[in-house]
Amino acid sequence: MKSLLLTFAFAATAGTALAADPPTPPVMAIGSQVPDFSLPAIDGKTYTLSSFKDAKVLCLIFTCNHCPDAIAAAGRMEEIHQAYKDKGVAVVSINSSSPLGLTPDELGYGAHGDTFEEMPLFAKDNNWTMPYLYDGETQTLSAACGAQSTPHVFIFGQDRKLAYTGRLDDAGRKSGPVEKSYIKNALDSILAGEPVKEPVTRSFGCSTKWKWKESWRKKDQENWEAKEVTLEKLDADLAKKLRENASGNVRLINFWSTTCGPCIAEFPDLVDAYRRFQNRSFDFISISLDPVEDQAKAQKFLAKQHAALSDKTKPSMEKEGRKSNNYIFSGDNADKLAEAIDKEWTGAQPHTVLISPKGEILWRHSAQLDPVELRRQIVKALEGMP
């Protein structure tokens, strides 16, 4: 009860002291009693501590959808669940991240954000069968346990006292066999009735995105909306250079017009994708097919969408001798544009292509985009790149 009251006190403080950046809750001490909780899960149920009363061991893993460390560990988390579910261990994953505490550029390593609605998609991508609970709304349990990063493991014995806290293993973001698994060692010791030899380790990963970090996100949004949005004319020769892609980046090119309903509908998702991946080797170029005399109209739309240029992309743009990331085709024959960038394009709008740093088309899509599939393709294209 005492830890639960402290949890609510922290939650109240965090809600009234955003500007003061409240301190991160400390990791609970070994021997502490597990706090009670009531959290919704992706299977439609609400789970409480009593939901796992029959388990010999309760293993809570605080994680999220966006962090590259959490993404890399997702498969290993399911492996632990499968290996110990018949041994009396309840492995429970918990999304501790508040979407309000995330800036777009922190989402550049996966296809999903940290909202409750995106959790089932993440679980499906990773073939999860364990319960996946959401604590991003209040972060009550995360604060009570002192979840520092994602992922962060807390293992409670049959007496529901903390016996281990820290990281899963030493694999980090590497693939292949795990050299040392702290979570397995801890579980095996507890099940054998023995003390855990290393009860506390550091939980390396992205810091927990506390709700009070919303002030950072708002400031980031203000800075983005203050950026200048430009629109330059594009001829066939420049279009060929865009396709050749000497930037060193994975390049997303979208063909659109202000009279195309699906183009207008999907454009916010394109800007969002650019902002998510802006810190990586990625750039976004829009090409308007509006009549060149309607340039002012196209410019107004782009400004409303905040289709600005990231400071991180500017060096690669200047390397190519360009002045903008937005263009309007000024040639007399759109066939030349299609021949320069994508010969398989039928001319239907919208049309999107993903181009490698070698100028190869990795993925193309006509009609309105599915934003999740777009992000999946970008993540795939960026594999092995910074």
Image (cartoon, grey):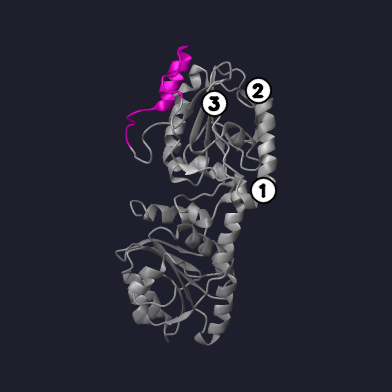
Q: Name the amino acid, label 2.
A: Ser
Residue at x 53% of width, y 88% of height = 293
The image shows residue 86 at horizontal and vertical percentages of: 49, 19
Q: How far apart are marks 1 and 2 (CA)?
A: 33 Å
Q: Residues within 10 Å of mark 1 (few under 14, many from 20)?
A: few
The quarter of the rendered structure image containing the C terminus is: bottom left
| Magenta-highlighted residues | 176-199
In the displayed structure image, the side of residue 41 where residue 125 appears, left or right = left
What mark, if any, has residue 29 been given in the picture? 3
Chain-order first, disc 3 or disc 1: 1
**Mark 1 falls on what kind of element?**
loop
Q: Name the residue under label 1.
A: 17
Q: What residue type is labelled 1?
A: Ala
Residue 62 pos. (x, y %): 53, 35
Q: Where is residue 362 in the image (x, y as percent from the top left)?
A: 36, 60
For the N terminus, the quadrant is top right
Mark 1 or 2, nearer chain start: 1
Q: Name the residue under label 2.
A: 50
Q: At numbered mark 2, what does the secondary structure look like: helix, strand or loop?
A: helix
Q: Can residue 29 be seen in this view?
A: yes
Q: How far apart are marks 3 and 1 (CA)?
A: 26 Å
Image x and y of residue 291, in percent? 51, 84
Q: Nearer the viewer, mark 2 or mark 3?
A: 3
User: Dots 3 and 1: beta carbons under 8 Å?
Assistant: no
Q: Nearer the viewer, residue 180 or 242?
A: 180
